[in-house]
């Protein structure tokens, strides 16, 4: 195990990584956790999942937010507001 920026990461020897590469890639993709690859006990590489981000924020919450009730209608309360134009 290696601690990187306060996160504990699984480590694996380069020779073991070579033998189990495809299996480890699937594991990382499924779990979202990174794996540090070591050579002679020293970290040399990191296998981490690809994080896809939308190009824009527009539509990024589609399907994640539910509107309950009427958000356009009045609240049924009177509101006194003054407009001062100078």
Image (cartoon, rainbow, N blue to C red):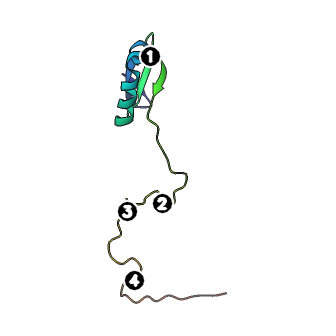
| Mark 4 or mark 3, earlier in chain | 3
Q: Secondary structure at mark 1?
A: strand
Q: Which residue shows up at 40% across the image and 90% down it?
A: 78
What residue did someone put label 4 on?
Answer: 73
Occupied quadrant, residue 9: top left
Against 3, residue 83 (above or below) is below
Q: Quadrant of the C terminus?
A: bottom right
What is the crowding at mark 4: few (fewer than 14 residues within 10 Å), some, or many (at least 20)?
A: few
Q: CA distance from mark 1 to mark 2?
A: 41 Å
Q: Which residue shows up at 43% across the image and 58% down it?
A: 61
Are dots 2 and 3 in contact, CB under 8 Å? no
What is the crowding at mark 1: few (fewer than 14 residues within 10 Å), some, or many (at least 20)?
A: some
What is the crowding at mark 3: few (fewer than 14 residues within 10 Å), some, or many (at least 20)?
A: few
Q: Which residue shows up at 43% across the image and 23% down it?
A: 36
Could you say which disc has been placed on residue 38 in the image?
1
Q: Secondary structure at mark 3?
A: loop
Image location of residue 84, percent across then percent down? 60, 87
Could you say which disc has been placed on residue 59 in the image?
2
Q: Which residue shows up at 37% across the image and 20% down it?
A: 20
Q: CA distance from mark 2 to mark 4?
A: 24 Å
Image location of residue 3, percent across then percent down? 40, 26
| Mark 2 or mark 3, earlier in chain | 2
What residue did someone put label 3 on?
Answer: 65
């Amino acid at each position: 195990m290696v601690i990187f920026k306060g996160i504990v990461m699984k480590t694996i020897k380069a020779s073991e990584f070579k033998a189990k590469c495809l299996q480890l890639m699937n594991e990382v993709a499924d779990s979202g956790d990174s794996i540090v690859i070591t050579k002679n006990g020293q970290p040399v590489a990191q296998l981490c999942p690809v994080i896809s981000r939308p190009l824009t924020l527009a539509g990024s919450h589609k399907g994640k937010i539910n509107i309950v009730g009427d958000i356009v209608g009045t609240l049924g309360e009177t509101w006194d507001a003054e407009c001062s134009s100078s």
